[in-house]
Image (cartoon, grey):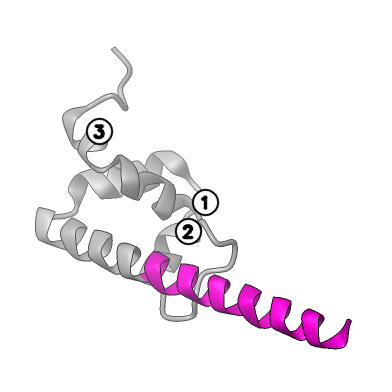
Amino acid sequence: MNKYLTAKNIENADLIATFQRCPFGDATEDCPFILYHRLNDPEEQIRIINTLPEEKLRELRSLHRECIALRRNQMKLNKANSNEFFSKTS
């Protein structure tokens, strides 16, 4: 059996990718995942996930979801503003 195919890794699959890099490219300055990104070692990042208490994982997951919602809204707003700008200059 694959050493990574554990119940805890499956439960936290949404965090594994986030521990490796920001899905938006550049993380915000206050991103709590930057510390884990800098490890640049997937095995170490997964090991850390497996050692963090559930409460910390829930907190990180919540912060990640809030960030995704905020950044998606920012992207939509930026796109709308860009479309508005180009429609006025045409």
> Type of residue at label 1?
Asn
Judging depth in this view, the residue of 77 and 18 nearest the camera is 77
Residue pointed to by mark 1: 40
Residue at image coords 65%, 83% = 81
> Type of residue at label 3?
Ile
Task: Give the mark nearest the N terminus, 3 or 2.
Answer: 3
> Type of residue at label 2?
His
Query: Is the Cβ of the residue at disc 2 closer than 8 Å to that at disc 1?
Result: yes
Residue 54 picture location, percent across and down: 11, 53
Residue pointed to by mark 2: 37
Furthest-top residue in this view: 1
| Dot 2 crowding, Cα within 10 Å, few <14, some 14–19, many 20+ | some
Q: CA distance from mark 2 to mark 1?
A: 6 Å
Q: Quadrant of the N terminus?
A: top left
Secondary element type, mark 3 = helix
Secondary element type, mark 2 = helix
Residue at image coords 38%, 68% = 69
- The span shown in magenta is 67-90
Residue pointed to by mark 3: 10
- Quadrant of the rendered image containing residue 9: top left
